Amino acid sequence: MHDANDSANRPIDRVAPMRPFLVHIFTACGAGCALLALLAAARADWVTMFVWLAIALLIDGVDGTLARHFRVAERLPRWSGNALDLVVDFTTYVFVPAFAFATGGLLPSPVAVPLAIAIVVTSALYFADQQMKTADNYFRGFPALWNAAAFHLFILKLPDWVAAAIVATLVCLTFMPLRVLHPFRVTQLRVVNLAVMALWCVLGAYALVAALDPGTIIAWSLAALAVYFLTIGLATADD
């Protein structure tokens, strides 16, 4: 038999409770990426800005899986992973891209700042919506993916008033009954959706390597894939 004092005499592993916290630190690194992206945007280095936003997107795509694997919510109930994720996502998905819209010359100067303000205000409200997702994991309305919107507009190089019309439309769609695909969470057509997502990532990486000038075919192919993500939810609404 084990001595009754064995458990008391065992050294306490004070490091173990900190291991799940590393997942929170990993998530919070996305905020660091946002700051580096903002610094790049301030010097009009748009390629570097999107590289940092892409790294933040990668962190966002992985941290949830890590959190579930290490049971972070159960083991560290004091720290809200959801709140942390929303804070980081707002900086990377919304705030930095809004700065790019305000200063990047994509939009006509009279409306650039007002539209950027509309982006951050409507997105803040969207992030506070506890019903931003449907029961089958589609987003309700345009899900504040302003990093992606900015990326496409930098690549497409549209006339500034056309770009402004697109931004204004997306702002309005934030609160419209649009079902926008979450490619990893939605089960309908998952194989197709993941294939489309993989293709978008490959073409997007090429566009970055090409300094946001990948050519007409790649630029409009990326735009077509983005339209797929925005509209496929409407086609599967009754499935």
Image: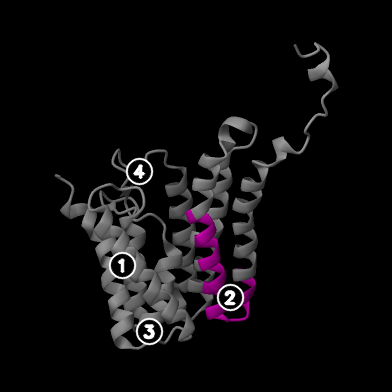
For the point 49% across and 60% down, the residue is: 93
Find disc 2 in the rendering and name its residue. 41
Q: Quadrant location of the N terminus? A: top right
Q: Say whether disc 4 or disc 3 marks the residue closer to the N-terminus.
A: 4
Q: What is the C-alpha distance between the residues marked 3 and 1?
A: 16 Å
Q: What is the C-alpha distance between the residues marked 1 and 2?
A: 23 Å
When the figure is inspected, residue 108 is found, relative to residue 58, above or below; the finding is below
Find disc 3 in the rendering and name its residue. 157
Q: Is residue 210 left or right of residue 88?
A: left
Question: Alpha-carbon neighbours of circle 4 within 10 Å: few (<14), some, or many (≥20)?
Answer: some
Determine if residue 96 is in view. Answer: no
- Residue 217 placement (x, y as % from top left): 28, 85
When the figure is inspected, residue 41 is found, relative to residue 168, above or below; the finding is below
Kind of residue at badge 1: Ala
Q: What is the C-alpha distance between the residues marked 3 and 2?
A: 17 Å
Instruction: Between label 4 and label 3, give the one nearer the viewer.
Output: 4
For the point 39% across and 86% down, the residue is: 214
The residue nearer to you, when weighing 219 against 159, is 219
- Residue 211 placement (x, y as % from top left): 48, 85
